[in-house]
Amino acid sequence: MVSPSGESAKGEGFRRHNNTKKYSSLYPTKERRFGLPDMDTSATKMKETLSIIPQFDGPRDGRPELTSAFFRNQPERQSERQPLPHIAATAQHNAAPSVATDLLPFCVTGMQLNSEEVIGLSDIAGSLKEVVLLALGASVDSDTRSTIEKAVGSDAAERVILFWGEEWVAE
């Protein structure tokens, strides 16, 4: 039996050919003829698949513990199970050194920056590009200069600004 919309009662993907007045012949839908997936069901399947896949931003993300179905159904024994270390503590030990913090002590005129000055500068600028932009801006803007001075001190701020002013030459 065929519904008024042309779909068969069993939903087999057939519809009536609407160009004839007799409506007697049944033609398969485009999806059935060309092997195209039904868009509604494929979108639903895609959403279901994506909801299963865990999203990770980088190497510091905690990985879920995968267990087989056999072990999920077994009662847990407290003596065999060790508590998992805190993810933040693990991330601190595995943190990759930053290129910016490695190079910042040397990006000054005169003496190198000490660790407190490097930390202060990296707090206001997360990358070398940001340090360059801040230093170049500080050479012409007193507000930007005061921001750097608050972070690293006036002497270190002057050395950073001079270094990047000399290194960055517009041709």
Image: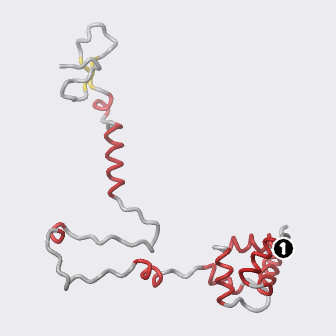
The answer to which quarter of the image holds residue 170 is: bottom right
Instruction: Please state the horizontal and vertical placement of residue 32, each as a whole percent of the image.
Output: 28, 31
56, above or below 113, in the image: above
At horizontal 32% and vertical 38% (from top left) the residue drawn is 37
Report the residue marked by disc 1.
139
Instruction: Please state the horizontal and vertical placement of residue 77, each as a whole percent of the image.
Output: 17, 80
Front position in the image: 27 or 125: 125
Front position in the image: 85 or 71: 85
Instruction: Please state the horizontal and vertical placement of residue 169, each as a whole percent of the image.
Output: 83, 72
161, above or below 58, in the image: below
Characterize the local packing of mark 1: few (<14), some (14-19) or many (20 or more) Cα atoms within 10 angstroms.
some
At horizontal 40% and vertical 77% (from top left) the residue drawn is 87
Most extreme residue toward the top is 21
At horizontal 75% and vertical 77% (from top left) the residue drawn is 148
47, above or below 138, in the image: above
99, above or below 141, in the image: below
Instruction: Please state the horizontal and vertical placement of residue 153, each as a whole percent of the image.
Output: 76, 85
